[in-house]
Amino acid sequence: MNNSNSEVVLMKGNEAIAHAAIRCGCDGYFGYPITPQSEILETLAAEKPWETTGMVVLQAESEVASINMIYGGGGSGKRVMTSSSSPGVALMQEGIAYMAGAEIPGLIVNVQRGGPGLGTIQPSQGDYFQATRGGGNGDYYVLVLAPASVQEMADFVDMAFELSFKHRIPAMILSDGVIGQVMEKVVLPPFKPRRTEEEILRECPWASTGRKNKRPINVITSLELKPEAMEKHNLHLQEKYDIIRETEVRYEELYTEDADYLIVAFGSAARIAQKAIGDLRRQGLRVGLLRPITLWPFPTKRIQELSQKVKGILTFEINAGQMVEDVRLAVEGRCPVAHYGKMGGIVPTPDELIQALKTKLQIKS
């Protein structure tokens, strides 16, 4: 996605999200400020894309209002997005469930902070369940991308929109306070023109855009009063989810070819794990890393394969242990699975991870 001729710039992850949104043809942003993601809205306000690309930028009166604006914009076939942090995204769950039920595309960015409740403004990965299990009602999923760098914060915006419209499913970029606030070099994506009304009509025949070109009005809703029709719709959704599980799994591996032990980590935790693994290898311990990039769909099959080769797996998350449940389901008892993490906004060090790996998997160095 990166333009090799583009300028390398230094910016925060939150700022990269905003610049990427402008460049990838986003039609509208509707959000509400909350730490540690407020720079997304602040950057968009400073850049004034409504003067250059026509992108709408609006601070809504609440998180509930912003997600319903995404519902409306996405329902008309527009590329629209919102961003928030953990308790703000919790307020959006009803609207996200409505979007999933009505098969409306849209992008939600969650820069996680510690919880539960208002918690702390410090980093966390405690929203894994909220993102991957669907925090609203009913049987649905949201496609979840977990960036581990500022570059991926920029790259994943267009990817999320493409996948969201391809499958008519809400997409979430699940970041955290570390990736949102850290400053790194990034190559921003090239500018992509916003789609014309004619292109939207052609690409989104399901969208509710009024009677343009004598087109009938599409009614978009997640409501169905007849049980048989509601079950048929749910079965359709489950079939779609099965297709996504088969076609959209993304992950990264490091030193898994000869690994005796495996660390599974995502986002900022994966960065800490990379440093720890380098130190462990210098100590003579063959440890590898699997980094899920899509948290849903989860790389279940690849973890199943690796569990047949390694002596033990440690999931490393900045929470009390959430992704570890998906890893255990994938492993099905083939090897020991343990978890290590911190809570309250405390970010573990590589040395703490090394000690935890040796202790929890009973490795003698």
Image (cartoon, rainbow, N blue to C red):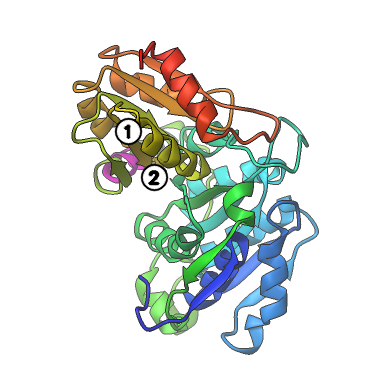
Q: Is residue 318 left or right of residue 312?
A: right
- Say which residue appears at 46% left-offset and 81% top-offset: 7
- The image quadrant where one finds the C terminus is top left
What percent of the width, then of the height, locates residue 139? 46, 33
Which image quarter: residue 68?
bottom right
- Seen from the viewer's position, the closer of residues 10 and 85 is 10
Cα separation, mark 1 vs mark 2, equals 27 Å
What percent of the width, then of the height, locates residue 345? 69, 35
- Say which residue appears at 29% left-offset and 42% top-offset: 253
What percent of the width, then of the height, locates residue 361? 39, 14
Image mark count = 2
Three-letter code for the amino acid on which mark 1 is drawn: Arg
Residue 210 in view, yes or no: no
- The image quadrant where one finds the N terminus is bottom left
- Which residue in the structure is indicated by mark 1? 281
208, above or below 346, in the image:
below
Q: Residue furthest bottom?
A: 52
Three-letter code for the amino acid on which mark 2 is drawn: Thr
Badge 2: how crowded within 10 Å, few (<14), some, or many (20+)? many
- Residue 294 has which mark? 2
Which image quarter: residue 257?
top left
- Say which residue appears at 52% left-offset and 62% top-offset: 75
Element on which disc 1 rests: helix
- Say which residue appears at 50% left-offset and 39% top-offset: 269
Residue 243 magenta-highlighted: yes
Element on which disc 2 rests: strand
Which segment is the magenta one? 236-244
